[in-house]
Amino acid sequence: QVQLVESGGGLVQAGGSLRLSCAASRRTFNNYAIGWFRQAPGKEREFVARIVYTSSSTVYADSVKGRFTISRDNAKNTVYLQMSDLKPEDTARYYCNVYPPARDAWGQGTLVTVSS
């Protein structure tokens, strides 16, 4: 079973920065692309960014392009989402999952709240 644990969320002022972490098993880390997703209150879960292990190539949603950076630390089996210039509309619960996402791999996520 795919297992991932998110952390790093919190309350931040607009314009600030925050780094989220996604800890995965070595098997998951080495065999799957990892994606970040988010769900705001009253909205559907949406794609944020993903990173491919073999080449570390990245893809971003237009809404976060230029502000967010996804990266991975192979030694720690961890994927990060560095978020900068945060906006109130970034407020959401953030989840990581394999990409394409697996239904049974969704966890509790980590809540990011951006105040204006």
Image: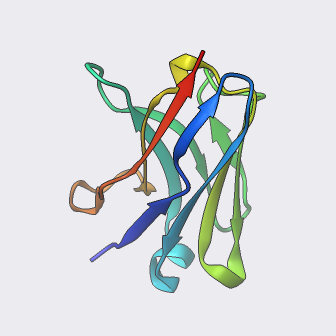
- State the residue in front, 20 or 3: 20
Return the x and y of residue 56 as percentages of the image width and height: 72, 60
Judged left or right of residue 56, residue 110 is left
Which quarter shows the N terminus?
bottom left
The number of discs equals: 0
Judged left or right of residue 63, residue 7 is left
Judged left or right of residue 13, residue 85 is right
Above or below 20: residue 45: above
Corner quadrant of residue 87? top right
In this view, the residue farthest toward the left is 104
Return the x and y of residue 60 as percentages of the image width and height: 63, 34
Above or below 43: residue 3: below
Which residue lies at the image location 56% right of the left edge and 78% below the top edge?
Answer: 30
Colour pattern of the rendering: rainbow
Return the x and y of residue 84 as percentages of the image width and height: 75, 34
Which residue lies at the image location 67% right of the left edge and 22% below the top edge?
Answer: 14
Which residue lies at the image location 41% right of the left edge and 56% below the top edge?
Answer: 97
Above or below 77: residue 82: above
Judged left or right of residue 115, residue 1 is left
Above or below 72: residue 69: above
Which quarter shows the C terminus?
top right
Corner quadrant of residue 68? top right
- State the residue in front, 102 or 86: 86
